Amino acid sequence: MDDASRDPQLDTGGGTRRRFLRFLAASPLLATAGIDLAALERLTSAHDPDDGWRLLHEVERAAQQGLIGAPGDALSVFDFEPVARAKLPAAHFGYMASGVDDDATLRANREGFSRFALRARRLVNVREVDSSMTMFGVRYDTPIFVCPTGSQKMHDPDGDVATARAAKALGHLMMLSGVATSSVEEVNAARGTPVWYQLYPTDVDAVAHAIVRRASKAGCPVLVLTVDLNGGRNTETQLRAGRVDQRDCTRCHTPGVAGYVRRKPMFDGLDVSNATDLGNPSMDWAWVRRCRAVAPQMKLVLKGLVTREDAELAVANGADAIVVSNHGGRAEDSGRSTIESLPEVVGAVRGRIPVLIDGGFRRGSDMLKALALGATAVGIGRPYLWGLAAFGQPGVEAVLTLMQRELHLGMRQMGVQSLRQLGRQFVVPR
Ligand SMILES: Cc1cc2nc3c(=O)[nH]c(=O)nc-3n(C[C@H](O)[C@H](O)[C@H](O)COP(=O)(O)O)c2cc1C
């Protein structure tokens, strides 16, 4: 499926259809909507090739949704989502958008923010605000980090490298997915400094340890161990989206772990024939300690904790930081948001290690709530993927810029000069 735009099935209507699409793509309306020939082909790939009128109607409808035509036209990160939807094949957009089961946790991540209100202070000089944060001795101008997300070349030909260039341009901390479609070496070069490496271990320890050694050799200072996908999952929305996608997915996707990692460079040269899972259902705290011993100089961050009990165990087992995360609602359908999980984790950690968070962050006010509740940094996943799919690297930069601008605006509105001043007194439950 990754090579959808080259699907020969699209030419089955012959030259007539392609000429018609070319004619449509030349329309100024569609250009304004950011719809080019490739996007048109994807948008219409599910249609009867001869049904020109229906096609035209569909395209007009997409254009009338008010799709932005350039990254700079966006008023908020939400403006990128419909463009990404229009440009991507249904199955690929479904992969990005999906939660699990009923998508209850996915929705909860957004709804959770409405359970907290901000308390604004007035008459503070906020002409200059400082949103910098420091993690493991490195200072960043922004607390917004780029979450690890897999298979980015399905959204844009440059994928993770485009994201890394955007993170470099704007100084964001970036975590690279263990199932990235670019290697850690390429991404480190694009980011200009080694990124944090997120591990999917598989259930074969030799594979996990070889990947950790490679990330360590590439200079990655931090290993991010994702611990919320060890039990399997049911990405039903993704599977439903796949059903309306008429392309031949078997051209790119083959079953099993070996098939899945075929296009994931971090697995190159590794024997995955015995792996049955990308996560490891037998992972426990002893496993974590063994994994850490493979590269003891790397910091260890556990991504996916949501309870005080596990936060306590993380500290006791030597974790250097925690990411409160439910995988963007893609792990379990607990229906519990990360922002609601944050206070108990922060309470259990008692300042001993940094607590980061992701899940549903789209607005400056969302980030202020998390930072006031004790988070050191806030991650975004889908918003930058919308930007990437819509406009490539400039789209990611525009998303990061909008988030940072909203954060600064929010800090001024709260009467906060630096993130250090944010605390529980700025939030009340609703
Ligand atoms: C398309 C997609 C792919 C993802 N891939 C990974 C991954 O490879 N590793 C990982 O730890 N988390 C992955 N995540 C979860 C993100 O790191 C992050 O926890 C989540 O996206 C944050 O929620 P948000 O998308 O609402 O901002 C992925 C999320 C999405 C949407």
Image: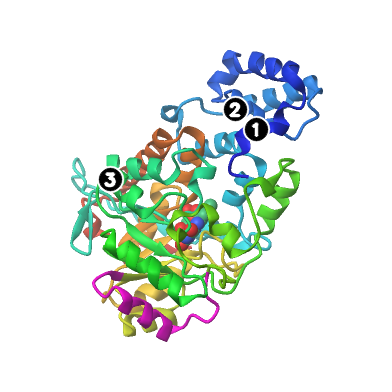
Q: Residues within 10 Å of mark 3 (few under 14, many from 20)?
A: many
- Disc nearest the viewer among 2 and 3: 2
Q: CA distance from mark 2 to mark 3?
A: 42 Å
Magenta-highlighted residues? 279-299
- Residue topped by disc 2: 38
Q: Residues within 10 Å of mark 1 (few under 14, many from 20)?
A: many
**Contact, mark 2 vs mark 1 (Cβ under 8 Å):** yes
- Residue topped by disc 3: 412
Q: Give the residue displayed 57% in from the left and 69% down from the top.
A: 273
Please tell me in which quadrant of the rendered image residue 9 appears.
Answer: top right
Q: Position of residue 56 (x, y in %)?
A: 73, 21
**Contact, mark 1 vs mark 3 (Cβ under 8 Å):** no
Horizontal arrangement in the rendering, residue 401 relative to residue 23 (left or right): left
Q: Position of residue 385 (x, y in %)?
A: 48, 45
Check disc 1 and give the amino acid type.
Arg
Check disc 3 and give the amino acid type.
Arg
Q: Is residue 55 above or below residue 338?
A: above
Horizontal arrangement in the rendering, residue 68 relative to residue 213 (left or right): right
Q: CA distance from mark 2 to mark 1?
A: 6 Å
Q: Position of residue 130 (x, y in %)?
A: 21, 49
Q: Could you say which disc has been placed on residue 301 in the image?
A: none
Q: Is mark 1 within 8 Å of ligand 1?
A: no
Q: CA distance from mark 1 to mark 3?
A: 43 Å
- Disc nearest the viewer among 1 and 3: 1
Q: Could you say which disc has been placed on residue 42 in the image?
A: 1
Q: Earlier in the sequence, mark 1 or mark 3?
A: 1
Q: Is residue 178 visible?
A: no
Q: Is residue 1 visible?
A: yes
Q: Is mark 2 within 8 Å of ligand 1?
A: no
Q: Earlier in the sequence, mark 2 or mark 3?
A: 2
